[in-house]
Amino acid sequence: MRPAVDTARLRALAAECGEAVPTGASEAALVTLAAECLAVFGAEPPREFLDLLRAMDGFEANGLRVFGTGALVDHNQAVREPGGLAEYLVLAEGSSARYAVHLPTGAAHELGIVPTDLLAVHPDLHTLVLAAVEAQS
């Protein structure tokens, strides 16, 4: 079983930056998001990411943005083709990296913003989110 995303680290980063953490997404919003991602990208977001959105529907602090139910599909559609991201579902972005799931393998990848180079492969979303928080701290 893969570890859950550490929401405490995200909440601590938000507190350090004086940012509010949004409430969690409703089950209906999560079901809709999963279905929309499946229809548009051919895959649902990972369970761990949906669990994160259940705890906080998106997040923004210190340059790190985790895409919530209202932004995930739109953002991915905007960056998918021009950014060479057709094989990815971008879950979060910071000032220097994108944090994404590689759809063919399910691996958690850290990608450069420009160009979209693979910077790191993380063992799971928990570790990917920790890398994102550390990069912004």
Image (spheres, grey):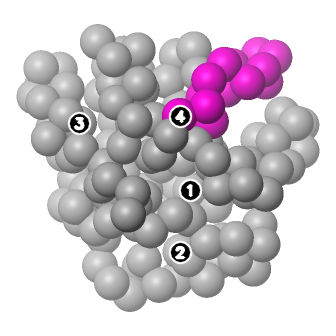
In the image as oriented, which residue stretches furthest toward the front?
1
Q: Position of residue 92 (x, y in %)?
A: 51, 39
Q: Residue 10 got which mark?
A: 3
Q: In the depicted view, which residue is nearer to us: 27 or 42?
A: 42
Type of amino acid at the residue the image marks with label 4: His
Residue at the spot 23% in from the left edge and 36% down from the top edge: 10
From mark 1 to mark 4, how far is it between C-alphas?
21 Å
Q: In the depicted view, which residue is nearer to us: 110 or 70?
A: 110
**Contact (CB < 8 A) between labels 1 and 3?**
no
Magenta residues: mostly which secondary structure? Answer: strand
From mark 1 to mark 3, how far is it between C-alphas?
18 Å
**Contact (CB < 8 A) between labels 2 and 3?**
no
Residue matched to label 4: 122
Residue 119 painted magenta? yes
Q: Which residues are magenta?
A: 109-122
Residue at the spot 36% in from the left edge and 43% down from the top edge: 126
In primary-sequence order, the first of circles 4 and 3 is 3
Q: Position of residue 79 (x, y in %)?
A: 76, 41
Residue matched to label 2: 33
Q: Taking 55 as reference, is 62 left or right? A: right
Q: Is residue 6 visible?
A: yes
Residue matched to label 1: 72
Q: Secondary structure at mark 4?
A: strand
From mark 2 to mark 3, how far is it between C-alphas?
22 Å
In primary-sequence order, the first of circles 2 and 3 is 3
